[in-house]
Amino acid sequence: MWTVEEAAALYNLPFNDLLFRAQTVHRENFDPNRVQLSRLLSIKTGGCPEDCAYCSQSVHHESGLSASKLMEVERVIAEARTARDAGATRYCMGAAWRNPKPRDMEAVVAMVKGVKALGMETCMTLGMLDRAQSEQLSHAGLDYYNHNIDTSERYYSEIITTRNFTDRLETLDNVRAAGMKVCCGGIVGMGELADDRIAMLTTLANLPEHPESVPINMLIPIPGTPLADATPISPIDFVRTVATARIMMPESVVRLSAGRTAMTDEMQALCFFAGANSIFVGDTLLTAGNPENDKDMDLFRRLGLQPMELEPMGQEGAP
Ligand code: SAM
Ligand code: DTB
Ligand code: SF4
């Protein structure tokens, strides 16, 4: 168990000491030059009843996004095949739901089975899940469920009022109990204090088991949302967050997630040095932009990074 004091002591280390420790831990657990590639698809866009202050897809904000229906299963599988052929090993399907309705389950189960049959790892993020839904997805072959705690418990109600922090933890429990791997992280750059980032990382590291995957998103400010004009996080503080996550959750894959379009190559290089070892590839995330594949592959070449390959059992990569 980590205390917030211990986490703060890491976060506030002299930068060189923090990065040295993070890189040392990283090398003990991973090949430092391999980065896992995931691809996202929004299978149901917009019209979400939740009021997350960062999100383009909430009905509470005027982001100008039009809502769409759940995508056809065949189209999802076709998109996944294209992503696989471009080098992604995990396909992550996201829906702008508070939670899936009973009538949605048949289609999402078919999506999991279809994508899995392509030989990819599967991930979904569909909002809150109860125990039975978690079991259903697990039986369909869903490898990962993404459900972020997003920020500290203290700051949560400043960002979202239509659900609470405990709701998030309950879904995470349900996902674990059903035997799926957990992808859980948060967003920084939402006007939170360093103490909120530290508290968020402490919650993640004190979950009954560390999430296998920890996405660290840098807020993409969306016009029309309450956070459209949030003060951006400084790159140094962002790298500190990544390094602290790496040290506190040594065996987790830390994903340099949303916001890379606004990062310099040098900032991304520092994040990889600090222990980030996964990214989203492809020019769109769910609704927002992401660097083009050519740009990412050029960065990988210049940094001597290689895509992480799937291990035979579909496990993520410790050497
Ligand atoms: N509706 C589901 C939910 O919220 O659990 C799944 C989709 S939701 C878009 C997935 C995650 O994307 C959020 O938890 C948040 O961490 C991240 N996210 C959403 N909008 C973002 C933004 N503008 N900038 C950075 N991250 C964002
Ligand atoms: C996560 O932590 N980040 C991804 C994924 N999980 C689902 C989503 C990022 C969304 C960025 C904003 C958008 O595309 O709308
Ligand atoms: Fe809905 Fe998820 Fe966006 Fe929140 S983050 S508004 S739950 S789609």
Image: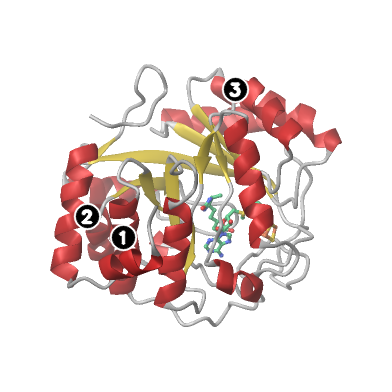
Q: Which residue type carries mark 2?
A: Ala
Distance from label 1 to label 2 (Cα)?
A: 7 Å
Residue contact between numbered discs 1 and 2, judged by CB atoms under 8 Å: yes
The kind of residue tagged 3 is Gly
Q: Look at the image and tell me whether residue 264 can be seen.
A: no
Front position in the image: 208 or 113: 208
Report the label total. 3
Q: Residue at x 72, y 67 (%)?
A: 51
Query: Label 2: which residue?
Result: 22
Q: Horizontal and vertical percent for residue 74?
A: 68, 26
Considering only vertical position in the picture, is 299 above or below 180? below
Ligand 3 falls in which quarter?
bottom right
SS category of the residue bearing label 1: helix
Q: Is residue 309 above or below residue 163?
A: above
Check whether the beta carbons of the residues at disc 3 and disc 2 lie within 8 A of each other. no
Query: Considering the numbered disc 3 on the image, is that residue within a helix, a strand or a loop?
Result: loop
Q: Which mark is residue 154?
A: none
Residue in the image at 59% along x and 22% along y: 141
Name the N-terminal-most of marks 3 and 2. Answer: 2
Most foreground residue, 124 or 249 = 249
Q: Check residue 244 in the rendering and tell me which mark sits there, or answer none.
A: 1
The kind of secondary structure element at disc 2 is helix
Q: Is residue 127 above or below residue 93?
A: below
Callout 1 touching callout 3 (CB < 8 Å): no
Q: Is mark 2 within 8 Å of ligand 2?
A: no
Residue at 55% across / 82% down in the picture?
A: 229
- Point out the frontmost of discs 1 and 3: 1
Does any portion of residue 57 appear in the rendered image?
A: yes
